[in-house]
Amino acid sequence: MKIMLSFASMLLISALLVGCGGSESSTENQEATIKELEEKIAELEAELLSYKEDNSNIVAPEEVATENETSDTEEVKEEVKVEPSPLEIVDYYVEPDGFIYNDAYVNLKNVSDYSIDSFEITFLMFDDKGFPVNGNHSNTNVEKGVGDRNIHPGDTLSDVYWYVSNQAEQIKVIVTKVNFFDRDPWTNPNEANWIQEEKGRY
């Protein structure tokens, strides 16, 4: 539509230019041509306006893509949403214990409505400057801990410790699995991502 309007306008301008200095008959012809072109332009403008009104509900491709991207993002957020850990980490610290190992203490509270049968946690070990420390028998600063202690709803498990490297003076801790007496286990789906993001530095 825009191309047709532009073309008609060019014809109108050409007609006006040609009309400068012609005879009386040619002037009359030019005036008739100009009037005809003006009527044609008016018709084209009316068609363009009607076209816009008929297609006002059409969404541009960019807008459709943006809407789809937003929907996809919301779906991804829903997929990674998980039930919070039934065990809350209240406190943790490291104490020296002889020549071979240090003791990693972790205090945990059962914040669920169910009695816990056992649980698993993951440690990340660091020295006093915050650099990773490998385990005594491994090439990584990641260690696993298992707790076979019963914890009733609302109770806190205190002063429980696990052996870690004798070079470890600081730790990070995450609960990775919780087993109950009367329901399915809870598993932390973010363990791998957490390790990858946190193991580099304290």
Image: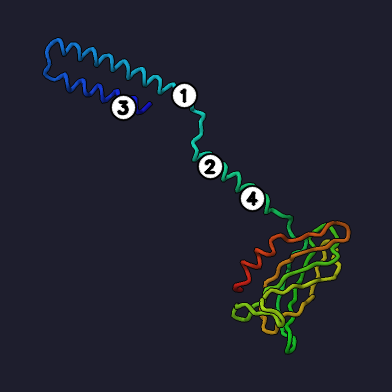
Q: Quadrant of the N terminus?
A: top left
**Residue occupying the point 62% across, 77% down:** 132
**Residue occupying the point 49% across, 36% down:** 60
Is 80 rendered above or below residue 51?
Answer: below
Kind of residue at badge 4 = Val
Q: Reading the chain from its start, which is encountered first: label 2 or label 4?
A: 2
- What residue does disc 3 label? 6
Q: Residue 53 carries which label?
A: 1
Position in image of residue 15 (x %, y %): 21, 20
- What residue does disc 2 label? 65
Q: Is mark 4 on a helix, strand or loop?
A: helix
Q: Is mark 1 on a helix, strand or loop?
A: helix
Is 116 rendered above or below residue 43?
Answer: below
Position in image of residue 79 (x %, y %): 68, 51
Is 59 rendered above or below residue 119?
Answer: above
For this view, does 73 lie left or right of residue 91?
A: left
Q: How far apart are the two marked residues, 4 and 1, measured between alpha carbons?
A: 37 Å
Position in image of residue 24 (x %, y %): 13, 11
| Mark 2 crowd level (few <14, some 14–19, many ≥20, 10 Å Cα) | few
Q: How far apart are the two marked residues, 2 and 1, measured between alpha carbons?
A: 23 Å
Q: Reading the chain from its start, which is encountered first: label 2 or label 3?
A: 3
| Mark 4 crowd level (few <14, some 14–19, many ≥20, 10 Å Cα) | few
Q: What element carries label 3?
A: helix
Position in image of residue 51 (x %, y %): 44, 23
- What residue does disc 4 label? 76
Q: Reading the chain from its start, which is encountered first: label 3 or label 1?
A: 3
Q: What element carries label 2?
A: helix
